[in-house]
Image: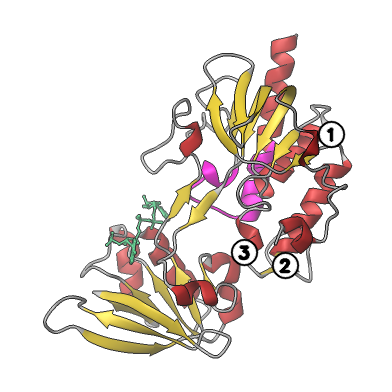
Amino acid sequence: MSLFKKMDISDNEAKASNQDTASEHVKCLIIGSGPAGYTAAIYAARANLSPVMYQGIQPGGQLTTTTEVENFPGYHEGTTGTELMEDLQKQAVRFGTDSRWGIATKVDFSSHPHKVWIDDKTLIEADSVIIATGATAKYLGMESEEKYKGSGVSACATCDGFFYRGKDVAVVGGGDTAAEEALYLGSLCKKVYLIVRKPFLRASKIMQERVEKAANIEVLFEHNTKEIYGDGVVEGAKLIKRKGESDETEVEIKIDGFFLAIGHTPNSDVFKPFIDTNEAGYISTKGASTHTNIEGVFACGDVMDSTYRQAVTAAGTGCKAAIDAERWLGARNS
Ligand code: NDP
């Protein structure tokens, strides 16, 4: 189903894609449509940059895969991820953002204007480019994981942990994210199982110590998840202890929530021939700005932020990217 249908926005309002031509010149091209992309669009549109946005693989971004959102300022009674994105999109379109379907499949940032190909056919030549392509949470790849997404399976404890207050949950992973999410959930939940596939945690020493000290976190070393089960919602998980060893055993835990914390993949591959990233693929930006190593190309949101990864922080960097683009264009033209 298309996101516009899901979001109940008409194709007219979205000014969707029929206007594509073989080649087009724009002042400000925004790639990606999560909170970062839409906020960049709101600011760029209000600054008369006539932004053109291509929505990408997952229109609306990661938030559209979550249910309730209670920590985005302004929604005092909470909202859903889809409604929040719908509101952001309406606000961006209201000020003149040209929001289109399409995925950036190739770029050439070697000369100005920058070139971006959409769906391998439409060439956009852009004076400035704002990359807001986000990151994708890694999942284990189990069928049951898909089945319970939004009904007990989540990849964001900060977003969804609140709904499991006083309940038992599990976190998968042994890195800093998993330790952090387990500690966060430990402050809300009755019990947290930390499911670690190795006999040790990869997390930093200080995080390991905090996990060890938490009375309600039980670390299950050398455990892999076989499946999640439940009647409509998550009720438990079947784990394999010491998989492949002679003493391999099946273990069952009763849980209400199953949190993935096995890493994120920033959606930066298409830009890598030109744009500097760190080892994990997150786009490097200069100081506190959103400037990348290429003049006139800016990055915001989860594709450049491995630390906070919140809708509101992504929106904040989206605002910064639009202001950086506006100032950069202004200085160039003056
Ligand atoms: P990491 O890549 O560091 O850790 C991923 C964890 O998930 C590892 O324990 C890995 O196991 C496990 N894992 C991966 N795939 C599977 C699988 N299929 N089944 C079971 N377990 C799996 O990712 P993080 O998101 O934790 O951290 C990313 C970076 O961000 C790191 O550099 C981290 O230090 C940093 N970070 C820093 C924070 C801070 O300073 N406050 C907070 C969060 C992250 P294995 O060890 O066996 O490979």
Q: Earlier in the sequence, mark 1 or mark 3?
A: 1
Residue drawn 22% across the image and 86% down it: 249
Mark 2 burial class by Cα count in 10 Å: few <14, some 14-19, many 20+ = some
Tell me how far mark 3 sits from mark 2, CA to CA.
10 Å
Distance of label 2 from label 1 (alpha carbons): 26 Å
Which quadrant of the figure has residue 164?
bottom right
Taking the image in four quarters, ligand 1 sits in the one at: bottom left
The amino acid marked with disc number 3 is: Thr
The secondary structure that dominates the magenta segment is: helix
**How far across and down, in percent of the image, does residue 165 sit?**
57, 82
Q: Comparing marks 1 and 3, which lies closer to the viewer?
A: 3
Measured from the top left, where is residue 333 in percent x and y? Answer: 74, 10
Q: Which residue is mark 1?
A: 46
As helix, strand or loop, the secondary structure at mark 1 comes to helix
Q: Which residues are magenta?
A: 301-319
Residue 111 versus residue 134 in the image, above or below:
above
Q: Which mark is residue 65?
A: 3
